[in-house]
Image (cartoon, helix red, strand yellow):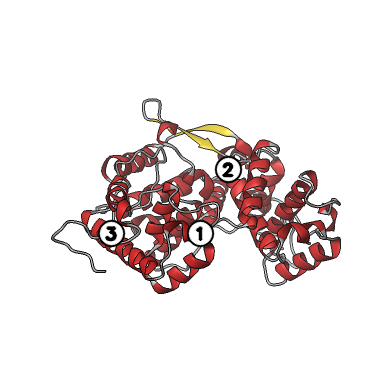
Amino acid sequence: MGASRSAGQVVRGPLAPFEAEFRVDLARVGYTSRSVRDLVYVMAGVSRWLEQRACAVSGLTPEVVAELRGQVSGVGPVLRFLGDAGVFGGSAAVGPVEVLVAEFRTWLGAQRGLSAVTVSCYGKQARVFLALLPEPLEVSLARLDAGQVTSFMLDYCRDRNTWSAKAMVTAMRALLRFLHVAGRVPVLLAGAVPSVAGWRLASLPRGLAAGQVELLLQSCDRDTIVGRRDYAILVLLARLGLRSAEVAAVEMGDIDWRSGEVTIRGKGNRIERLPLPVDVGEALANYVSAGRPRRDSTAVFLTTRAPYRRLSIAGVRAVVGYSCRRAGMPRVGAHRLRHTLATDMLRAGARLAEVGQVLRHRSQLSTSVYAKVDENALRVLARQWPGGGAA
């Protein structure tokens, strides 16, 4: 049945009672009036689709949702609203893998005390493995053996780089310990996860060429909201050497404007206060005062489109990638800005210990990799080549 605009009611059928609440919820999270109108018409399409199949809202099982997504476009916001409101079987839409991943994440935080970023990474890695096990999941876990674990790891790591493979190794060992402790796997299989060959300090930290950081900063149009946000993110990465996760985790309350300091939540749940240089403070102030959406979120960096949410770690990395494209540079990772800060300090005469303090390394071994690019220290070690000239 078609919707009548003159009556003010757009949605007909099983979702009609939820239209008004849906409009309010969309406006609350920052959608424009035009976007609200468009999404309400999407809800109307979903309602018609359900009505034609004589399907109640409570009948939105994972199978029905998959069919719906294939036939009605743009249904994500509608489904999220219905799930958050509890008007359809949210638990029915969550499979056994997601339930187990949620339990694993809770265990990592409560029993292992890992940071939220680490918990999230381990959860994603665990989902990859668990999703490959045949159903029913409980039976597959009860029959899990060392051969299956080793075979999975060999297949997973075949075409991946060393760091990606090591991340999966760490997550898998944690998952298998959890499954054993929880009684899901009768034998502790963490030892069946093979190690990844890798040599510490084998790689050479690569910084950006002279002037490339400034090109990235200049690529941001600070007359726009996106440009002010991206500039502030790049300044934090380049001037303070923050990691992507640390930038994404900065809260409004972490910035002490009066004392000129910012609190950083680093690796291993470490809380550290850093001085806020003038250029970094100005970039943050410009974004917060004339760019950041006025929302209840405590995060400093938010998405620029509704619904406004905390910018994810992947979002921070994407900012660097987009900036490289605007600057006409090859794409580089966010961590390259951290390496650039370290190498620039060494070339300016700083000692390794000072670099370690700025980068907040807990171990001198972490900083020692930069000895390879410390030209001032290496120059005095160079021996004369036979016949004249330095080696």
- Number of the label disc, if any, that sits on residue 40: 3
The residue tagged 1 is 208
Q: Position of residue 282 (x, y in %)?
A: 33, 40
- In this picture, residue 207 sits left or right of residue 309: right
The residue tagged 2 is 116
Q: Residues within 10 Å of mark 3 (few under 14, many from 20)?
A: many
> On the image, which quarter does residue 139 sit in?
bottom right
Q: Position of residue 179 (x, y in %)?
A: 76, 49
Q: Position of residue 200 (x, y in %)?
A: 74, 54
* Image quarter (top left, top right, bottom left or bottom right) of the N terminus: bottom left
Give how far apart the Cα atoms at labels 3 and 1 are.
48 Å
Give how far apart the Cα atoms at labels 1 and 2 are.
30 Å
Q: Nearer the viewer, mark 1 or mark 2?
A: 2
Q: Residues within 10 Å of mark 1 (few under 14, many from 20)?
A: some
Give how far apart the Cα atoms at labels 2 and 3 are.
35 Å
Name the kind of residue labelled 2 in the image. Ala
Residue 220 appears in the picture as rendered: yes
Q: Residues within 10 Å of mark 2 (few under 14, many from 20)?
A: some
Residue 198 appears in the picture as rendered: no
- In this picture, residue 108 sits left or right of residue 335: right
Secondary structure of residue under mark 3? helix
Secondary structure of residue under mark 2? helix
Q: Nearer the viewer, mark 2 or mark 3?
A: 3
Q: In the rendered structure, which disc, 3 or 1, sits on the residue that comes first in sequence?
A: 3
Q: In the rendered structure, which disc, 1 or 2, sits on the residue that comes first in sequence?
A: 2
Secondary structure of residue under mark 1? loop
Name the kind of residue labelled 3 in the image. Val
